[in-house]
Amino acid sequence: MKKTVMTPRVPRAQGAVPFFNLIPKPPYEFSLSAAIFTGGEPDIRTFADGTFRQVLDTGSGPVVAEVRSSGTTEDPALSLTLRTDHEVSGIAAEDIRERIASMLSIDDDLVPFYRAVHADPILADLSVRLRGLRVPVTPTVFEALTDSIIEQQISLKAARSIENRLIRAVGKELALDGTWYHCYPDPEILARTTDSTFRACGLTVRKGEYIRDSSRLILAGDLDVEGFRNYPDTAMVQAELEKIRGIGRWTAELTLLRGLHRPDAFPADDVGVRRFISQFYLGGVKISPGDARAFAERWGAWKGFAAYYLEVADLLGIRPAV
């Protein structure tokens, strides 16, 4: 855990350091793809005033990564600036560049997805109005897994508040330009986080145990969640995730979609997912998880991405024109 700071915390100013150009595969619409982060915390992750900001750990310390668009939907280009209070090696900077590119899914090819949902009037309409929207990915699979544990059986708003409190309580910090920035805690930190700290952040003792246990499995080499990226079979990965204490079907499916970017992962037990299907297709009639799974089969291997398009449409107040 963090040591008590006995001296006044005075953030140091530091100019911009490495700068990169990122070229997404078209179509790519930055404002739509980053919209899900609107209203986030400026010291952790947010999208505001045309800038996406994410605090990441290079291993030698936190870095503030800032992304802006300098292109169009059909000719996209992004600029990435890294800011920190320490020198960033070329290898570390390139690692951050790759992680941001992965987070924003800039290499995705949307054409197969749009083709797959073309026969669905609702999604065909949304794919035009949300053209270039990418499904984001968490910086690590571990983050997706931990967030999904926190979000079990509580509202997303409450979960986000708990996640942010946990990040600020135990995550690595960066003092920069008059602001303190905070990184998502890694397995080494969460493996030694105490019950009292988890409780102070709003977590139950049981959820704290699940997070601490999974962190310790990773440190011991008994769980390689990042290695699941190399498994092509989504069902196999889901089965492996569900072997972890505290990880059920819903948590595994969220981890697959958010952390492993699997378009066929569909968290039907999620209240929000069922609500989106209900309001866009069924006139507001409530449906069960089983009903949602059956309904989503029309989207085939793209059911997870289809659900995300419905979520963003709902977030932006878009209703289909059909």
Image (tube, rainbow, N blue to C red):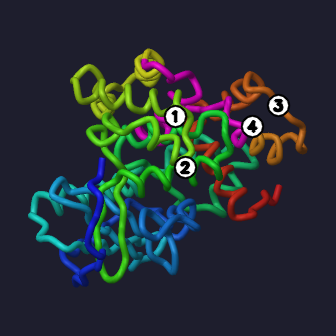
* Residue closest to the eye, 170 or 200: 200
Q: Look at the picture and state if 30 lies above or below 248.
A: below
Which badge, 3 or 2, comes first in the chain's sequence? 2
Q: Quadrant of residue 11?
A: bottom left
Q: Which residues are magenta?
A: 244-273
For disc 2, the marked residue is: 162
Residue bearing mark 4 = 274
The picture places residue 233, in percent across and down from the top left corner, at 40, 22
Please name whichever residue, 248 or 49, is drawn nearer the observer in this view of the structure.
248
Q: Quadrant of residue 299?
A: top right
- Residue receiving disc 3: 287
Please give the name of the residue rendered at 68% of the width and 29% of the height, measured from the top-left corner.
269
Mark 4 and mark 2 lie on one chain; the one further toward the N terminus is 2
Amino acid type of the residue that numbered disc 1 sits on in the rendered structure: Ile
Instruction: State the separation of the CA atoms marked 4 and 2.
Output: 24 Å
Residue at x 9%, y 64% (from the top left corner): 89
| Residue at the spot of label 1 | 149
| Left or right: 306, with 66 as reference point | right
